[in-house]
Image: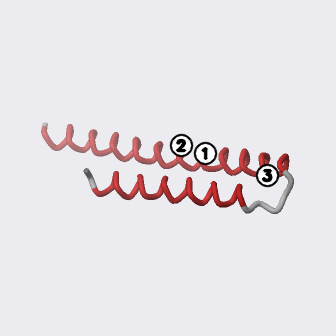
Amino acid sequence: MDENVKVFLGFLAGAATGAIAGILLAPEKGDVTRKNISDKTSQLKSDVNGQVQKGVEKLNNLKKFCILFNQ
């Protein structure tokens, strides 16, 4: 398995463990906790989408470079 995949899976496992611990130990009421989880999930989704977009952009630039270099 690629080292980057292992790191990413480790990150996901850590994030899930932290989320579960946070829910179990949350000092707020359920509705407040659910809103916090929703907000954090939306932020994480936005962050991941941004990182994916950066990765796609880098791949497209590499593709353009390879096409120019091979001509």
Question: Disc 2 residue type?
Answer: Asn
Relative image position of residue 9 (x, y in whole percent): 41, 52
Q: Residue at x 60, y 45 (%)?
A: 46
Which of the two discs, 2 and 3, sits closer to the camera? 3
Distance in Å between CA atoms under marks 2 and 3: 24 Å
Q: Residue at x 25, y 44 (%)?
A: 65
Question: Disc 1 residue type?
Answer: Ser
Residue lying at the far front in this picture: please name it. Answer: 24
| Residue 56 vs residue 5, the one in the foreground | 5
Q: Residue at x 13, y 37 (%)?
A: 71
Question: Disc 3 residue type?
Answer: Thr
Q: Residue at x 47, y 57 (%)?
A: 11
Left or right: where 9 falls relative to 17: left
Q: Is residue 4 above or below residue 63?
A: below
In this picture the colour scheme is secondary structure
- Quick one: SS at disc 3? helix
Label 1 with label 2: CB-CB less than 8 Å: yes
Left or right: where 62 falls relative to 17: left
Q: Which residue is mark 3?
A: 33
Q: Earlier in the sequence, mark 3 or mark 1?
A: 3
The image's mark for residue 49 is 2
Report which quarter residue 18 is drawn in. Answer: bottom right
The image's mark for residue 46 is 1
Q: How many numbered badges does the structure rendering display?
A: 3
Relative image position of residue 58 (x, y in whole percent): 37, 47
Relative image position of residue 20 (x, y in whole percent): 63, 55
Label 2 with label 3: CB-CB less than 8 Å: no
Distance in Å between CA atoms under marks 3 and 1: 20 Å
The image's mark for residue 23 is none
